[in-house]
Amino acid sequence: FAADGITAPLRHSIFRRIWLASLLSNLGILIQGVGAAWAMTQMASSADKVALVQTALMLPVMLIAMPAGAIADMHDRRIVALVSLSIALCGATALTTLAWFNMVTPNVLLTLCFIVGSGMALFGPAWQASVSEQVPAETLPAAVALNGISYNIARSFGPAVGGVIVAALGAVAAFACNAILYLPLLVVLLLWRRN
């Protein structure tokens, strides 16, 4: 990677690992969104219910973002990120398990999507604020830009990948994929030792 371009932050192993793992977790939540919308269409014929799936996943960003930023500033950002990812993983695992046993109702689906979204909403500020600890100050603008690129890559490909997974294997596979894609980020954060 060039020492002075947009890819300069990727020269730093901790940033590179966290960036790649967060790309995977962003893909996972978008894949789950497709699976959840499909599962809702199977359970309820109402278009409003299907639209509520995206609301349940994204509403926590509006409700939790400001308190999450304060929490990230007051506490160890690595610990905040680990706790928030654990919340999202628990929600994704519960959704996968209940869907596997065919025990998901529309309200359960919306509740678990809200829990997953809450975990990710709490994770965002801690992750973004910790970028300055992962790269030198001169590469910080490029690192922030790469984080935006990471989410846009996931947003571009996640729904398509989710559609393929749902079409080939069903909604349960999309839920399981999301749960599995949280694991690399959890491992990278567990191994990261902040200065």
Image: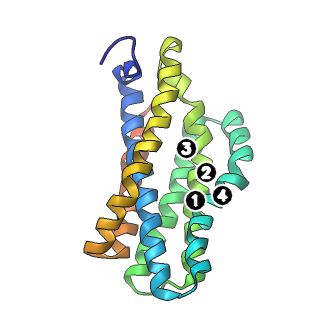
Answer with mark 4 or mark 3, whichever residue precedes in sequence.
4
| Label 2 crowd bin: few (<14), some (14–19), many (20+), radius 10 Å | many
| Type of amino acid at the residue the image marks with label 1 | Gly
Spatial CA distance of label 2 from label 3 is 10 Å
- Evaluate if marks 1 and 3 touch, with contact meaning CB atoms under 8 Å apart: no
Query: Do the residues bearing badges 4 and 1 touch, measured as CB atoms within 8 Å?
Result: yes
**Above or below: residue 173 compared with residue 153:** below
Place of residue 61 in the rendered image (x, y in percent of width and height, measured from the top left): 65, 53
Reply above or below: 188 against 167.
Answer: above
Q: Relative to 7, say whether 60 is above or below.
A: below
Label pair 2/3, CB-CB below 8 angstroms = no
- Among numbered discs 2 and 3, the one appearing first in the sequence: 3
Tell me where residue 8 appears, x and y as whole percent.
38, 18
Mark 3 neighbour density, 10 Å: few (under 14) some (14–19) many (20 or more): many
- Label tally: 4
Numbered mark located on residue 60 in the image: 4
Q: Amino acid at mark 3?
A: Ala
Q: Position of residue 88 (x, y in %)?
A: 52, 58
- Regarding mark 4 in the picture, which secondary structure is present there? helix
Distance from Cα at disc 4 to Cα at disc 2: 6 Å
Residue shown at the point (61%, 72%) measured from the top left: 52
Q: Which residue is mark 3?
A: 81
Judged from the image, the secondary structure of the residue bearing numbered disc 1 is helix
